[in-house]
Structures are given as C-alpha cells and as structure tokens.
C-alpha cells in the first residue's frame, strides 16, 4: 500500500505587512490571519496539523512558535535562519 499522506502544515509569516509585501513563501498566511481563524472557529488547526512559523532571520518566528504552542497546544517549529537562511540554502543547491 502507498504511504500515508504527510500531515497538514500551516506556514505562518510572522513579519509585518510591509515586509510580507516584499517577499513571502508560497502558501503562507499571516500571523493575523491565523489568529483570526483560530478566534472564529479554530479552523486553522486540526490534531494532525503542524505549524511552521517564519520571519526574516528566525528570531521573531522562534518566539511566535513558542507562544502559539503555549496558547493553542499546537505542534510548532520555526524556519531556522528565516527567509534569508532559506534563500541562501536554495542558492547553494
């Protein structure tokens, strides 16, 4: 039998609106949008959902990953090195 599908992931950009307007990762939502969905009906999370936060260099996303884990009990992590680290890794590939 084929392997099971990977668990769903919510990719959250914790940067400000002006920062997001310069660049963003495909499929990401803003922290504000995530919080609004959770407040409305919790639709941003299921038991299987993993939450990945990111920012420019990784500091803010690490903070927000911890905060979201504490607030919602979410399985969270953050993109180490942020967008800059991700871009640098892709340029080496």
Image (cartoon, rainbow, N blue to C red):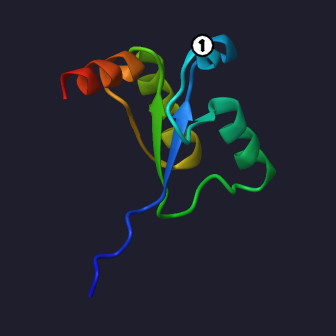
Most extreme residue toward the bottom is: 1
Residue 29 % position (x, y): 62, 37
Most extreme residue toward the left is: 92
| Residue 58 visible, this orientation | no
Vertical comparison of 21 with 74: above or below:
above
Vertical comparison of 71 with 55: above or below:
below
Which corner quadrant of the image does residue 83 belong to? top left
87 sits to left or right of 28: left
Query: Residue at position x 48%, y 58% from top?
Result: 8
**19 and 39: which is toward the camera:** 19
Q: Disc count in the image?
A: 1
44 sits to left or right of 85: right
Most extreme residue toward the right is: 40
Query: Residue at position x 36%, y 16% from top?
Result: 84
Q: Quadrant of the C terminus?
A: top left
Residue 19 % position (x, y): 59, 13
| Residue 85 visible, this orientation | yes
42 sits to left or right of 66: right
The residue singled out by tag 1 in the image is 19
Residue 53 % position (x, y): 47, 33
Q: Quadrant of the N terminus?
A: bottom left
**11 and 87: which is toward the camera:** 87
Query: Residue at position x 45%, y 15% from top?
Result: 56
Dot 1 falls on a residue whose secondary structure is helix
Vertical comparison of 48 with 28: above or below:
below
């Amino acid at each position: 039998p084929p392997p099971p599908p990977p668990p769903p992931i919510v990719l959250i950009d914790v940067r400000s609106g002006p920062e997001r307007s310069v660049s963003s990762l495909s499929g990401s939502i803003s922290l504000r949008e995530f919080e609004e969905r959770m407040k409305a009906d919790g639709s941003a999370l299921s038991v299987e959902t993993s939450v990945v936060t990111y920012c420019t260099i990784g500091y803010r996303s690490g903070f927000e990953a911890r905060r979201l884990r504490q607030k919602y009990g979410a399985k969270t992590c953050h993109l180490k090195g942020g967008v800059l680290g991700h871009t640098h890794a892709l340029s080496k590939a």
